[in-house]
Amino acid sequence: KAGVTQTPRYLIKTRGQQVTLSCSPISGHRSVSWYQQTPGQGLQFLFEYFSETQRNKGNFPGRFSGRQFSNSRSEMNVSTLELGDSALYLCASSLTGPGERSGNTIYFGEGSWLTVV
Amino acid sequence: GQQVMQIPQYQHVQEGEDFTTYCNSSTTLSNIQWYKQRPGGHPVFLIQLVKSGEVKKQKRLTFQFGEAKKNSSLHITATQTTDVGTYFCAGTQGGSQGNLIFGKGTKLSVKP
């Protein structure tokens, strides 16, 4: 079956602009989580959506937002971009969520590389 | 806030040597997961540990979850060049709906 698909793979934006990233989870997966990965901070949790509802949120400013559609596809948006937002944004999908005890596998997409200049 | 500390940050080994990375949490975890990320790639799920004191093996990889569910380790026996990458642990707190808190990772390089 198809893996987690993230688009776009690479993009360059200017400070102050906004960006929307898209994630299509594995078919049947209802949980989509977003992470920011930078060399300095590592992998940081942004938020998790399950059945169109935001179930968990990390410690990021309100400029970072997301949503999930009825087909489980998810988007994240970053408004008023700052240089420090340059990072790899990763989406992860799973059947029921990253915190589940059932041992369900979490699958990451290849990520969207965002450069803010 | 929740923290998962992972050491060492870097490890350089000769092919055939063993490798271990350790994770410690400031709080009790519901479960812990391990991921491997190859250079330029994305994290790939390796395993999840749930039970106190649990030990799981995958070929040359041995994963342990501490009795207090606050620490974990990944041990690779007789490393190979294909083991190169960054190994991350990630813990969850807060039951079934907890979010993943990642360690900073251990970057493993293997000299042939």
Image (cartoon, rainbow, N blue to C red):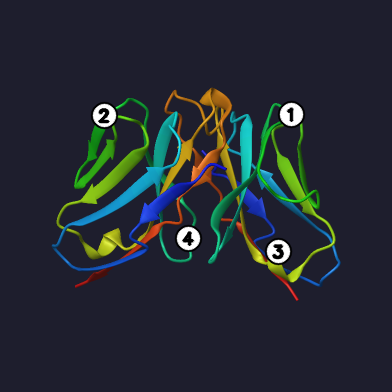
x and y percentages locating residue A49 in the rendered image: 68, 34
> Given contact means CB atoms under 8 Å apart, are the residues at marks 2 and 3 in contact?
no
Q: Residue beneath label 2, please?
A: B53
Name the side, left or right, on which B105 lies relative to A83: left
- Which image quarter: residue A94? top right
Pointer 3 residue:
A85
Q: Earlier in the sequence, mark 1 or mark 3?
A: 1
Q: In the image, which is nearer the foreground, mark 4 or mark 3?
A: 3
Image-based side of B75 in relation to A51, left or right: left
Q: Quadrant of the C terminus of chain A?
A: bottom right
Nearer the observer, A75 or B86: B86
Q: Amino acid at mark 4?
A: Gly
Q: Which residue is mark 4?
A: B41
Q: CA distance from mark 1 to mark 3?
A: 24 Å
Query: Residue at the location (41% across, 56% down)?
Result: B105
The span from disc 4 to disc 3 (Cα, nearest Å) is 20 Å
Indicate which disc residue A53 carries.
Answer: 1
Residue type, mark 2 in image: Gly
